[in-house]
């Protein structure tokens, strides 16, 4: 224990001599959370809408009002008949164009089917599909109002219809930020933990002090723990700052049991720090360690964890690769605790996967350190 404490004190003194790096380890995750939290969103609101109303009847104006009075569309242009509509999308003046033909109001008054056209910029297929869904819902609501009014005018009662009464759990406002921020927290924690340990050990190699540690009466496990514990404390502090930032700025409330959150964060950081040590046993320069740590932690955590892209829609061979990405398991538990208020016992398979990952990468780092000593 005395030798372990000596290595930890040495590492803490080393960290204190480089206050800029310490500030980056603590403040960088919170800063990135703020930037990505405001910039990264899947919500589609205030779509730029152009309306070409060729009918200009009370019915057409009601339909236009149903679009513009919602939070989904903003009226930005009213092109005249004969104007080039494709030019509006090419110049990005509008993302959607609603075209109401002549005779629209007369067709409805005569009981005939009236058709309107919606032109969409399909370059971004996901956004276009969302906009199309909004438009269909608004037209369906307007169509139901028309049918009800016509039946009432004829003195008939409208036929009963099926009414959907949705109740959205965990994220009532359907804000994508509530879903994305836990994933962003896991991404930032992984990057900072991996890079901090990888760079610290490689820095010892470059300065020649690593050889002194190897000839010292230290066991490999004591060296690993002594190098890891200080950065574990720093990473925990950075995690607390990130969670507070997410609560204050984005309203992300932790609904679960805080000790459960602490346990899963510790397991996750244990694996991330162990992986950073493993990279440090391969790299001989801080530049290589930074590049290797960033690429092998950032890309899998971003692309193969379910943070942005759903794993179940990936090809089977790519789904198999995701099983070795710790973020896959951490995000499931983190979202369950933060958003749903679930207990840790609900996610035992994911928790055990984090334990196995941490033990494997730490064992690999230990074996490589022992071989280098031999």
Image (spheres, rainbow, N blue to C red):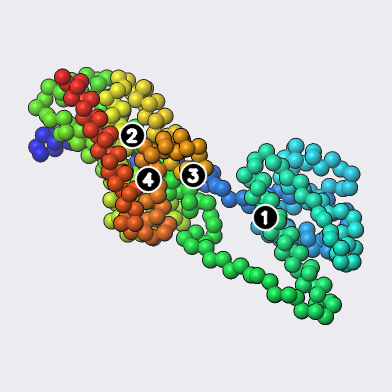
Q: Nearer the viewer, mark 4 or mark 3?
A: 3
Residue at figure coordinates x 84%, y 77% from the top left:
153
Closer to the chain start, of discs 2 and 4, is 2
Instruction: Say which residue label 4 marks.
Output: 329
Find numbered disc 4 in the image and state the secondary structure of the residue it sits on: helix
Q: Nearer the viewer, mark 3 or mark 2?
A: 3
Find numbered disc 1 in the image and state the secondary structure of the residue it sits on: helix
Closer to the chain start, of discs 3 and 2, is 2
Instruction: Say which residue label 2 marks.
Output: 194
Cα distance in 3D space between marks 2 and 4: 17 Å
The answer to whether residue 108 shows anywhere in this view is: yes
Query: In this rendering, is residue 373 above or below 28?
Result: above
Q: Residue 51 versus residue 170: which sits nearer the camera?
A: 170
Where is residue 269? Give x, y as percent.
30, 42
Left-right relation of 190 to 150: left
Cα distance in 3D space between marks 4 and 3: 14 Å
Closer to the chain start, of discs 1 and 2, is 1
Cα distance in 3D space between marks 1 and 2: 43 Å
Which mark is drawn over residue 312?
A: 3
Q: Nearer the viewer, mark 2 or mark 4?
A: 4
Where is residue 56? Give x, y as percent.
87, 58
Instruction: Say which residue label 1 marks.
Output: 134
Q: Residue 372 versus residue 231: which sits nearer the camera?
A: 372
Left-right relation of 245 to 95: left
């Amino acid at each position: 224990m005395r030798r372990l404490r000596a290595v930890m004190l040495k590492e803490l003194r080393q960290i204190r001599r480089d206050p800029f790096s310490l500030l980056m380890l603590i403040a960088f995750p919170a800063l990135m959370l703020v930037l990505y939290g405001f910039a990264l969103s899947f919500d589609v609101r205030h779509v730029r809408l152009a309306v070409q109303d060729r009918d200009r009847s009370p019915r057409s104006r009601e339909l236009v009002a149903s679009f513009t009075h919602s939070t989904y569309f903003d009226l930005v242009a009213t092109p005249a008949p004969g104007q080039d509509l494709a030019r509006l999308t090419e110049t990005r003046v509008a993302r959607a164009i609603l075209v109401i033909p002549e005779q629209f109001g007369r067709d409805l008054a005569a009981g005939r089917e009236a058709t309107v056209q919606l032109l969409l910029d399909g370059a971004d297929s996901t956004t276009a599909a969302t906009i199309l869904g909004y438009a269909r819902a608004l037209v369906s609501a307007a169509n139901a109002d028309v049918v009800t009014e016509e039946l009432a005018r004829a003195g008939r009662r409208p036929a009963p219809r099926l009414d959907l009464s949705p109740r959205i759990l965990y994220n009532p406002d359907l804000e994508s930020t509530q879903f994305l921020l836990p994933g962003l927290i896991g991404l930032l924690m992984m990057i900072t933990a991996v890079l901090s340990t990888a760079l610290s050990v490689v820095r010892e190699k470059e300065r020649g002090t690593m050889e002194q540690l190897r000839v010292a009466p230290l066991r490999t496990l004591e060296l690993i723990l002594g190098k890891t514990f200080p950065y574990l404390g720093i990473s925990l502090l950075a995690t607390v700052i990130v969670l507070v930032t997410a609560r204050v700025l984005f309203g992300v409330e932790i609904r679960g049991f805080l000790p459960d959150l602490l346990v899963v964060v510790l397991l996750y950081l244990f694996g991330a720090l162990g992986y950073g040590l493993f990279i440090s046993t391969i790299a001989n320069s801080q530049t290589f360690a930074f590049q290797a740590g960033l690429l092998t932690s950032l890309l899998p955590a971003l692309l193969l964890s379910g943070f942005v892209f759903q794993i179940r829609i990936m090809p089977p061979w790519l789904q198999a690769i995701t099983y070795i990405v710790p973020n896959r398991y951490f995000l499931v538990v983190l979202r369950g605790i933060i958003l749903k208020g679930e207990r840790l016992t609900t996610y035992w398979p994911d928790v055990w996967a984090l334990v196995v990952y941490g033990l494997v990468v730490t064992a690999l780092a230990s074996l490589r350190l022992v071989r280098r000593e031999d």
